[in-house]
Image (cartoon, rainbow, N blue to C red):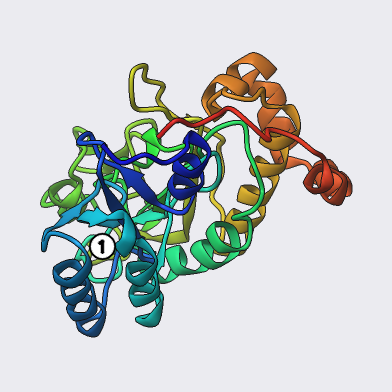
Amino acid sequence: MLKISEEEKKALKGRGIIMTNDGEHFVARVVSSNGVFSNAQLRALTDAAGKYGDGRIAMTTRLTVEIQGVAYENIEPLVSAVEACGLVTGGTGSVVRPVVPCKGTVCVHGLADTQAFADRIYNEFYLGWHSVKLPHKFKIGIGGCPNNCVKPGLHDFGIVGQSVPEYDEDCCNACKKCSVVEKCPVHAASTDEDGKLVIDWEKCTNCGKCVGACPFDSVEEKERGFAVYIGGIWGKTQRLGTPIGGIYSEDEVMKLIEKALLIYREQGKTGERFGRSIDRIGVENFIAQLKSDDILDRKQEILDAKLHLSGGATC
C-alpha cells in the first residue's frame, strides 16, 4: 500500500491523477478540448501509457481518456509527456469540467459546428476559469440538434442546436402529397381535410428537417441558433434541465454561461449541485437573473471572493 498523505492525494486528484482501488496505482485523466484527438496525440498517449502506465487507456463519458496503472514515481514524467503533445491532465474538482460536444460538426443531422463551439467554451471556461472554485462540479454539454445524443438536458448547462422553421400558408397549394409531413420525424406536421399543411408548434422540436422540403417554398428557415437548458443532473438523483426559452447565438450562449457561473458561485451553497441551487433560489428568479446583466456588475467582486475553498465535488 502506497503511503502518501491525504493532502497529497487530494492535490493529485485536483490535477486529474486519481488513486485506484488497489491503493498503489493511479489513473491519469487526459482532457481534450472538444472530444477530438489528433493521430499524433493518440500515438503519444499510447506510447506514454506503455512507458509510464500498464499499457491500457480507458475512455470516459466526458470524452476524456484515462491512462491506467500509473506508479507514483511515473506521475510527473507522464504529465510531462502529456503536455508535450499539447494536452493536459485534469477534469476533476468543483470547477468547470471538460466540455462534451456531439459530432454535429460532421453529422448529417448537425445544425452547428459543435466541436468548434466546444473548443471555444473549453478555452474560455475550462482553461480560463480553472482556478475559480464553484459549489460543485459544473458540466457543459453541446448537442448539434434535437436528437440530443450527448443528453444536454442532463448537464448543468445544456446547449442544443436549433433550426426554427417559418410556415407561409399562402405558399402551400394543398398538393395532397406533402413533403413536409413526410420529413417531420416528430409528427408535428399534418394536413387538413383540404390537403393544406398544418403545423403543431407545441410538437415541433426545431430539428430543421422540414426546411426546404416543400417544392413551393412554404416552409423556410426563420432562425438558426441554440436552445439552452440549465440545472440538469444525472447521478444518485436526477433532474432534467430547465429550458430558459428563446434561441441564442454562440456569443449570447457564451455570455449566458458566464452569468450562470457567476450566479452559481455567488448564490450556490458549497456542495450543492447547480440544479439544486436553481430550485432553492427559484426557477423564475434564477432565469430572470440569467437574462439580466446585473450580475456582471459584480463579476470581479464574485471572482475575488474567498468562496467554496473546501468541500464540494468528491469525484
**Image quarter (top left, top right, bottom left or bottom right) of the N terminus:** top left
**Placement of 68 over or under 283, stated as above or below:** below
Does residue 164 appear in the picture of this structure? Answer: no
271 and 100: which is toward the camera: 271
236 and 5: which is toward the camera: 5
Secondary element at image label 1: loop
Q: Position of residue 54 (x, y in %)?
A: 12, 59
Does residue 215 appear in the picture of this structure? Answer: yes
**Placement of 202 over or under 169, stated as above or below:** above
Instruction: Give the residue furthest to the bottom.
Output: 40
Q: Which residue is mark 1?
A: 103
- Residue drawn at 41 percent across, 21 percent down: 239
Badge 1 local density, few (<14 within 10 Å), some, or many (20+)? many
Is 315 situated left or right of 129 in this image?
Answer: left
- Residue drawn at 45 percent across, 68 percent down: 119
Is 286 situated left or right of 32 in this image?
Answer: right
223 and 250: which is toward the camera: 250
203 and 247: which is toward the camera: 247
**Image quarter (top left, top right, bottom left or bottom right) of the C terminus:** top left
Q: Amino acid at mark 1?
A: Lys
Is 264 situated left or right of 228 in this image?
Answer: right
Q: Position of residue 120 (x, y in %)?
A: 51, 68
Q: Quadrant of residue 310?
A: top right
